[in-house]
Amino acid sequence: MLLDPRRTVVFAGDSVTDCGRRTDPDGLGDGYVRNLYDDLGPRRPRIVNVGISGNRAADLAGRWSTDVLAHEPSVVSILIGINDTWRRYDENDPTTAESFETSCRAMLDPLTCPVVLIEPFLLPVKAGQEEWREDLDPKLEVVRKLAVEYGAILVPADAELNRQASTAGAATLAGDGVHPSATGHRAIADLWRRVVLED
């Protein structure tokens, strides 16, 4: 499906997707999107990274027409949610699971192409991050529910990265529990490729 240069895959999300793409001449950044670009080789589709650091689901929904739909995507991959949790704890600015779901539906409803939903993830490293689960887990359930409802491909990043962290150590995959290391990005890219292209 994806190994066709006539197709366009748009990756939308926050800093985990952004990864410096706005200062990268190729516009890809140096994270999992770049890894996938390299992995897919010369027959790859056109890959567009529209991640913006700090975004929450509502921010993504607000720029959806100009940043995503304007590219006439063949596939859209979305990774969003950790900032919707994080802002509750660092800025006392929470996003309810209901509001998060409303924003996600605003993104999904206008799409007429296949969709990939990557689970937002947390790999607790810092003191107090375990408590974030109370906020993140309901949002994870929203993502999983919407994947079923909209027929999207679910990439189980939270489950898989936490599984790997149990042996490799959380800090190996994400030094602050949120932003992946090179090893963490490699793991996301490998999981995406396995689930989307091979399953």
Image (spheres, grey):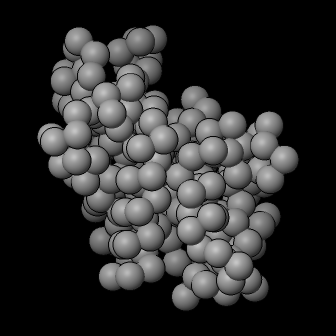
Residue 64 location in percent, x, y?
Answer: 67, 53
> In the image, is 120 to the left or to the right of 18?
left
Q: Percent from the top left, x then y, of residue 101?
A: 40, 49
The quarter holding residue 29 reads top right
Farthest-out residue, right: 25
Would residue 106 be visible to someone looking at this image? Answer: no
71 relative to 129 in the view: left or right: right
**Residue drawn 68% across the image and 83% down it:** 43
Task: Note whether 90 is above or below 14 in the view shown.
Answer: above
Residue at position x 48%, y 41% from top? 182
Image coords of residue 91 (percent x, y): 45, 11
Q: What is the quadrant of residue 65 in the picture? A: bottom right
For the residue pair 165 and 1, the one nearer the viewer reads as: 165
Front-most of 175 and 195?
175
Q: Quadrant of residue 51?
A: top right
Q: Is residue 60 above or below residue 88?
A: below
Residue 177 in sight from this viewpoint = yes
Kindly give the residue lying farthest to the left in the view shown: 166
When the figure is inspected, residue 85 is found, relative to residue 121, above or below; the finding is above
Query: Residue 30 placed where, x, y %?
Result: 63, 44
Decide: is 127 above or below 116: above
Q: Residue at point 50% right, 71% down?
A: 115
Total tally of numbered discs in the picture: 0
In what quadrant of the picture does the C terminus appear? bottom left
The residue that appears at 19% across and 30% down in the rendered structure is: 134
Q: Quadrant of the N terminus?
A: bottom right
